[in-house]
């Protein structure tokens, strides 16, 4: 492996780690903000002690839903909405990891930063929900994957602890047409 590809790989790893730290901080800040709003509402209502519920809804002055905190299939989920009622941010904690989704204005497509089975990944999805690109890291190595419109992997660059780097390209059906080494 040449020095330039090592530098690029290290740079990508540093950028992914920085993005993960920022997303974790933003996730905790959003959760703290929602919990603070709930606490202030409880205090204003004259309650003392903990507030217990299976879900909370935060609405604006016009009664529009702006945030919700709920349990879905036993997993806590925080959703933030725009004034039109579209969920733009979704933070979920699962048994096997967590995810932060950022959606576009129409609630379509999106970016997910998540940890699944203890490996971090950053994925980009098209308007129909299909995956278009992914950057992931695991104990065995890391990879950048690019997908076609149908959601089939078309190009993969991986750096693995055993065996070193791997690069392959596929046709529109997902059949490998070139690979190295």
Image: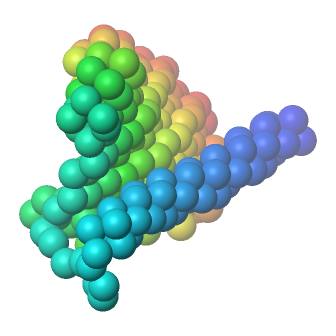
Q: Nearer the viewer, residue 10 or 49?
A: 49
Q: Nearer the viewer, residue 158 or 175?
A: 158
* Left or right of residue 181: residue 76: left
Q: Nearer the viewer, residue 32 or 49?
A: 49
Can you say whether 95 is above or below 79 in the image? below
Query: Residue at horizontal 64%, vertical 51%?
Result: 22
Residue 36 coordinates in the image, percent (x, y): 44, 65
Residue 172 coordinates in the image, percent (x, y): 30, 11
Q: Quadrant of the C terminus?
A: top right
* Left or right of residue 160: residue 177: left
Can you say whether 146 is above or below 94 in the image? above
Query: Residue at horizontal 35%, vertical 28%?
Result: 82
Q: Quadrant of the N terminus?
A: top right
Residue 123 coordinates in the image, percent (x, y): 43, 37
* Left or right of residue 161: residue 146: left
> Which residue occupies the extreme left position in the image?
73
**Residue 67, can we see it?**
yes
**Residue 98, can we see it?**
no
Residue 8 location, quadrant: top right
Query: Residue at horizontal 60%, vertical 58%?
Result: 25
Query: Residue at horizontal 31%, vertical 37%?
Result: 60
Residue 23 coordinates in the image, percent (x, y): 56, 51
């Amino acid at each position: 492996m040449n020095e330039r590809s090592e530098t690029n790989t290290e740079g990508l790893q540093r950028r992914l780690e920085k993005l993960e730290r920022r997303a974790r901080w933003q996730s905790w800040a959003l959760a703290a903000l929602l919990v603070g709003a709930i606490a202030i509402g409880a205090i204003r209502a004259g309650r003392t002690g903990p507030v217990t519920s299976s879900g909370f809804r935060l609405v604006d002055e016009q009664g529009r839903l702006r945030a919700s905190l709920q349990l879905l299939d036993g997993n806590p989920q925080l959703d933030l909405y725009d004034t039109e009622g579209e969920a733009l941010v979704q933070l979920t904690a699962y048994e096997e990891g967590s995810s932060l989704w950022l959606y576009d204005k129409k609630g379509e497509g999106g970016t997910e930063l998540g940890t699944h089975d203890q490996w971090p990944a950053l994925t980009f999805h098209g308007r129909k929900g299909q995956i278009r690109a992914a950057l992931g890291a695991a104990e065995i190595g890391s990879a950048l994957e690019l997908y076609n419109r149908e959601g089939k992997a078309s190009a993969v660059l991986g750096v693995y602890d055993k065996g070193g780097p791997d690069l392959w390209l596929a046709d529109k059906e997902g059949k490998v047409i070139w690979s190295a080494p």
